[in-house]
Amino acid sequence: MTTAVLAAAAGGAALLLGLLLTEPLRRLALRRGITDRPSARKAHTRPTPYLGGIAVAVATLAAGSAAAFAGGVFDPILGVLLGGAAVMCVLGLIDDLRPLGPALRLGVEASAAAVVVLEGGHPALFGGIVDVVLAVVWIVFVTNAFNLLDNMDGAASSLCAIIGGFVCLTALSGGPDGLGVTMAALTGACLGFLFHNKHPARIFLGDSGSLFLGFTLASAMMVLHGDAVGLSGPVSLLLATLVPTLDTTLVMLSRYRESRPLLQGGTDHIAHRLQRLGMTVGRVVGVLGVFAVTGCLSSMLVTYKMLAPGVALAAACVVGIIAVRLLLKAPANAALSPGLRVSAETTVAAVARSTVRLRTDSESGRRHRQLRPMAAPHTPDDQRANTRPPTTGAPSTPQ
């Protein structure tokens, strides 16, 4: 069985698993109250379940490992990569249920990244320990960049499918066979999950999914370019992750200029700014996807020595600077389009009106069916208190 057939089988199996596993996890999250509740710093307007990332992780690990074993292309490096990805999924799940401190999260991420770099290799740019440190930092950066990128329906899963598909093609044409098979599985799992995550999303990735996606992609690309020497390797890595890199840069720069906490959530990402310029959610995801495809194609050209890395790096820097400068002029924290955000004042007023109507109807003797009150948005301190029972605003039955 050829590697291409193995990759196709892994991708198809992962797509099916991702499609089928997501719905039971969505129902479980609703029953347990594991939901992302609306707040002033979020774009969704109703409690939406997490745990979608578990479906993506299980589908990727199961289908990728099974296909690699069946084809005899499973190697120790692949085992280290998938083991680190599984650790990221567990770390994210714990953070979804009980938020962890940034120091602990970064420590675990750096440790897992270091194991991948030491076992799987890294591009040689400066030589020695400096390259090792830079490789670890880059994996941790991309891991958290995808965590930040998971801010709009279908955005992170779509971009991961695009980048994963290009990494798969590159690996199948000249990289480790097992890596290509695994990337095919990751792409298929994201496509299967996207059926539930497209706008309007019925379930979110959560930290368990976004950390898993970012770490798996970053580690796979690091291993794929592990024998690169000079500027070509780092430039290829940068171009393939151009969208999450620009999004993180924009958010950090914007919050620094406005003296806001860098790690505090907000609607100041590229996707939110494009939406405020009049784009629909679907069009925003499409625009981000086009930029991701362009970056990945450029990365492949650099990898195959069809484009000079210096020229590609200069072009990427120019495009990035122009994009960030233009996006900084777009509204960062103004209200989103009507119907996409419910303010705290509007929600509280609706609850008050419902209460008055119920009292009036009761006093007048009229009989009406009982109304379920809306849930007022939580405070930032309560925004991810997922271990508590569902609020009255959370759906009582799966939808």
Image (cartoon, helix red, strand yellow):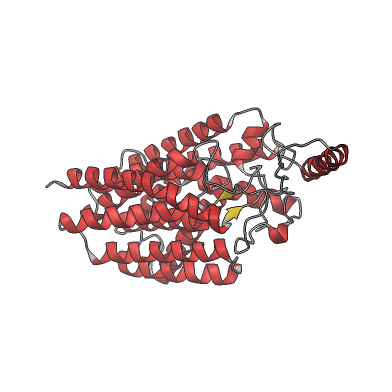
Which residue is located at x 35 percent, y 39 percent? 307
Q: Position of residue 141 (x, y in %)?
A: 51, 58
Percent position (x, y) of residue 87? 42, 66
Rendering coords of residue 55 (x, y %): 41, 52
Tally of marks: 0
Horizontal placement of 380 versus 231: left or right? right
Q: Is residue 142 visible?
A: no
Across and down, in percent, residue 149 comes to 54, 48
Between 209 and 346, which is closer to the camera in this rendering?
346
Kindly give the residue lying farthest to the front in the view shown: 365
Q: Residue at x 31, y 64 (%)?
A: 120
Position of 245 relative to 212 (above/below): above
At a point 63% along the width and 49% down the height, the residue shown is 394
Between residues 354 and 303, which one lies in front from this camera angle? 354
The relative height of residue 266 versus residue 130 in the rendered view (above or below) is above
Left or right of residue 253, residue 23 in this image: left
In the picture provided, is 264 more to the left or to the right than 7? right
Task: Tell me, yes or no, if residue 109 can be seen here.
Answer: yes
Q: Nearer the viewer, residue 174 or 186?
A: 186
- Compare residues 195 and 233 and report the one nearer the observer: 195
Compared to residue 363, the image places residue 248 above or below, namely below
Q: Residue furthest left?
A: 1
- Tell me which corner region of the image, top left, top right, bottom left or bottom right, holds residue 324: top right
- Residue furthest top as drawn: 278
Q: Quadrant of residue 271?
A: top right
